[in-house]
Image (cartoon, rainbow, N blue to C red):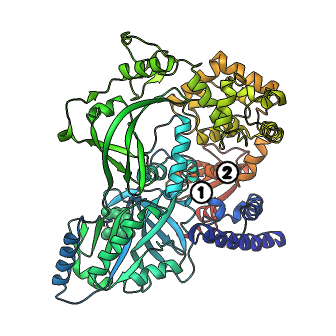
Amino acid sequence: MEDINKAKQRIEELRKALNYHNYRYYVLDSPEISDAAFDELMQELKRLETEYPELITSDSPTQRIGAPPVEAFGVVEHREPLLSLANAFSYEELAAWHKRASNLLAGRGFDLVCEPKIDGLAVALTYVDGLFVTGATRGDGYRGENITQNLRTVRSIPLSVPKEAPPRFEVRGEVYLPKAGFKRLNEERAKEGLPLFANPRNAAAGSVRQLDSSITARRPLDIFIYGLGWVVGKAVPDTHWEIMQWLKSLGFKINPNIALYHTIEEAEECHQNWVESRESFPYEADGMVVKVNPIALQQELGNVAHEPRWAIAYKFPAIQGTTRLANIGINVGRTGRLNPYAILEPVHIGGVIISHAALHNEEDIHRKDIRIGDWVTVQRAGEVIPEIVGPIVSRRTGEERKFSMREKTWEIYRERKGIAGEEEPPDHPICPVCGAEVIKPEDEAMHRCTNAACPSQALEQIKHFVSRGAMDIDGVGEKLCQALFEAGLVKDASDLYYLTREQLLGLEKMADKSVSNVLNSIEGSKNRPLARVIFALGILHVGEEYAELLAENFSSIDELAKASQEDLLSLPSIGPKIADSIVTFFRQEGNKRIIEKLRKAEVRLEEERAEEVKSEELPLDGLEFVLTGKLESFPRSEAEAKVKALGGKASSDVTKETSYVVVGADPGSKLAKAQKLGVKTLNEVEFLELLNQNTSLF
Ligand code: IVH
């Protein structure tokens, strides 16, 4: 008893400290302690919670890691509908909106609140008795998806709120991916050969709607709360502005750019300022939301259809420009994908010089009818690679040329190889780098080079191997990879581990000191965690997230190499495409050779202490539960999922091995069996307490 009380006290201290530092870091962007110090506190809390699983609560900072995948999201009925906004595209439209509202309010004046309109995903967060209990998407406005588990992983969403908060209330906000996070995510996806997200909005939506919340947990999602949904049991401030300040005091993240004005002219000025400064916002905003400040007047104005009369989205103009499409080039990526790109006559768009733009694939080029030599409209949106909106057909001279993958790949290849003459191109597209045949799988839009030894792929693969998320070999950057590759010293990544001092000294610009650094970095990379090694191998479709998942389930590269298609398919979120790709990878002789060379060089190809780490993390590890009868709080399947999420086992037969039988209403014969075998029983309340000390609210 003594010990558990002590543990309880320490756990509370740790949670308080972790929540505070979390808030400083994710909400205020102003950390007070180092990441290492934070991790230390977190480890201590995890250790205590493992020892005393009965003390785990749903708002513990340890509960942000993500839960096992769900089959599909449940449905949440919104108590009050989530509306959308009408748009204004000009000052005239904004002023007309303001005039209409003023008229309806019979000349009673009102202030206006201006906020950036974040381009993300609308969510509604419900808090009951101080705890975050439900998070839902907007859905059709009336019914959304239950994405609570995923939202728990968003660090700027408080899992609990102070006592002063109302007993029950809902806040609304926009979940988004900051520009930097979006850029990083797409860079990683490019390395993995996965399709890129077109913009931060899609990326945020894709991340939030993951069935496996541990994937969401790895995405750097953030939130801005922009309003109150409904409140029960407490009076709240009577203007939007004050409500936002009050929500801020409860720990919610509010956009720091929020501004209060008296007149519509001031709102216009604010809009103009933001149009100019939006590039510097760390998030993507596509407009400014203008809201009537007094809540009583908002209510009086009400809604038309799904749009409130008391707010409007005053859109920012798209950042566009026009220029000539000088040519189309083709890159070959690490996974053999042929990526066409636009070579533009350089043009200033929104303060940045643009000379290249994405052209996703051949079909897309034809769909938009983009021709080489065309004048085109180019659009930039924040960190997204500039895109061609379409050709300006009226400016065509007749000199423009239609794009053909077959002709273009041949042209690039011929130039590269110095092949002269009028030779006809082959009757199919080829790899512009190695000349091998390319394929276009039916379900894919991209052409792919089939030659595993294609130099472009090999070099890209070496660059990938040394990169930061992979083996992280400091000092071996893209240039050095290229030099080593061209000198024939490194033909595949494993050759890096056989480089000698003399070989490196023989390269241009490599002095004694930098050679030592490079050799040290290479040596130091031999002990990377298994997940990184798997990622570094560059298996098609296996990015960092899947690499982690694989490392959690296979203890070594050899184990993984032995895995069958079925073994792989039994893992959450691995589908046939990825399973296929993994099996094919380990079947190829070239890849087997690389792995053997890595092994000979003493690169660690297995995980250390994989078992220990796993059980330490999960508080119900080793406990077996049987559920019988009807539970009030949630369906039995959900209760079983919760047990599993905490590392416990849920089974259907009561045996001597059973740790607990959870008894709901109208229990079946399992209760009798438990009593006969002397297995401990828990009623629903005790069970909830075990899952979470504060679960009386479920
Ligand atoms: S207020 C009744 N404020 O824009 C309207 N919405 O088209 C409530 N959005 O679904 C919305 N930033 O997801 C509001 N500062 C902001 C916003 C914002 C982004 C989104 C929101 C809504 C959509 C409306």
Q: Residue at x 48, y 74 (%)?
A: 256
Q: Is residue 375 above or below residue 598?
A: below
Q: Residue at x 68, y 37 (%)?
A: 466
Question: Are the residues at dot 1 and dot 2 in contact (C-beta closer than 8 Å)?
Answer: yes
| Secondary structure of residue under mark 1 | strand
Q: Amino acid at mark 2?
A: Ala
- Which image quadrant is residue 476 in? top right
Counting residues from the start of the chain, the first of labels 1 and 2 encountered is 1
**Which one is nearer the viewer's eye here, 23 or 460?**
460
Q: Residue 126, image x and y in percent?
A: 46, 68
Is the CB of the residue bearing disc 2 within 8 angstroms of ligand 1?
Answer: no
Q: Is residue 673 visible?
A: yes
On the rendered structure, is 40 left or right of 133?
A: right
Q: Residue 549, image x and y in percent?
A: 63, 40
Which quarter of the rendering shows the N terminus?
bottom right
Q: Residue at x 31, y 27 (%)?
A: 403
Is the CB of the residue bearing disc 1 within 8 angstroms of ligand 1?
Answer: no
Q: Dot 1 surroundings within 10 Å: few (below 14), some, or many (20 or more)?
A: many
Residue furthest to the bottom in view is 108
- Which image quadrant is residue 478 in? top right
Residue under label 2: 674
Q: Residue 147, image x and y in percent?
A: 47, 56
**Which one is nearer the viewer's eye here, 145 or 114?**
114
**Badge number at residue 663:** 1
